[in-house]
């Protein structure tokens, strides 16, 4: 996931998301974002006149859209799409990352939510980002035969479980919480499919 060929603004939003997922909002500085993005420092004020809050909110929005777009790719990669298969693919993104790169990074939306829970604009950006992720998960579940009346609540359950398992995996430096979530939640998800 690189940002080659994108302009400085897009690279800074991407870089902010990457740094937030590693360091949290408080420890991510504007100069660090510009350096990571290989963008001129002066461009921060130009592209983000609202300062760090605007940049964080846009990074959180980007992360939600990115997660939402990944849902279709996960489903397309399943030989026979099932709710448990979708959840397993969502979790595998994290188990694969942790196996390759260690446990240094988590979800930027969750990190921003924790760091900025009292700030209305960032809280709203995080809620919108989670909705941008939840909506395609619910749509995929409906396409798999889950009744529409249950799809949104199960999508919320899947994302909530995944976020908790990511947090526990980082704390324990072990993917066990992710693999346990997949094993235990899978049958419940598949039982929701209309027969």
Image (cartoon, grey):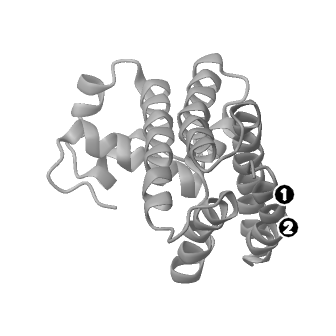
Front position among marks 1 and 2: 1
106 or 16, which is in the foreground? 106
- Residue 12 image-quadrant placement: top left
Task: Describe the element under mark 1 as helix, strand or loop.
Answer: helix
The answer to whether 44 appears left or right of 5 in the picture is: right
Q: Are marks 1 and 2 in contact (CB under 8 Å)?
A: yes
What's the CA distance linking mark 1 and mark 2? 8 Å
Q: Nearer the viewer, residue 53 or 144?
A: 144
Position above or below: 26 against 186:
above
Residue furthest out toward the front: 195
Where is residue 86? Give x, y as percent.
61, 60
Above or below, 192 relative to 99: above
Q: What's the mark number on residue 184?
A: 2
Residue occupied by mark 1: 188
Query: Tag 2's secondary structure?
Result: helix
Residue located at (51% from left, 40% from top)? 64
Q: Quadrant of the N terminus?
A: bottom left
Q: Residue at x 75, y 68 (%)?
A: 182
* Residue 168 place in picture, x, y as percent: 79, 64
Q: Above or below — where is 136 with respect to 123?
A: below
Percent x, y of residue 158: 72, 50
Task: Report if residue 29 is visible in the image.
Answer: no
- The residue drawn where x is 69% and y is 43% is 155
In this rendering, does residue 113 appear at all? Answer: yes
The label number, if any, that marks residue 171 in the structure image: none
């Amino acid at each position: 996931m690189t940002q080659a060929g994108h302009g400085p603004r897009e690279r800074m939003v991407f870089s902010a998301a990457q740094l937030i997922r590693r360091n949290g909002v408080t420890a991510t500085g504007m100069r660090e974002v510009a350096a990571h993005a290989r963008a001129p420092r002066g461009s921060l004020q130009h592209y983000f006149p609202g300062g760090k809050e605007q940049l964080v909110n846009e990074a959180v929005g980007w992360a939600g859209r990115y997660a939402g777009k990944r849902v279709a790719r996960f489903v397309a990669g399943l030989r026979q799409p099932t709710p448990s298969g979708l959840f397993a693919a969502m979790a595998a993104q994290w188990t694969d990352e942790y196996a390759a790169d260690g446990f240094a990074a988590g979800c930027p939306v969750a990190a921003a939510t924790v760091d900025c829970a009292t700030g209305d604009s960032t809280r709203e950006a995080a809620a919108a980002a989670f909705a941008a992720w939840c909506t395609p998960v619910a749509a995929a579940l409906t396409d798999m035969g889950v009744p529409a009346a249950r799809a949104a609540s199960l999508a919320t359950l899947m994302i909530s479980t995944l976020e908790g398992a990511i947090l526990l995996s980082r704390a324990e430096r072990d993917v066990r919480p992710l693999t346990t979530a997949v094993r235990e939640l899978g049958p419940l998800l598949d039982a929701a499919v209309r027969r």
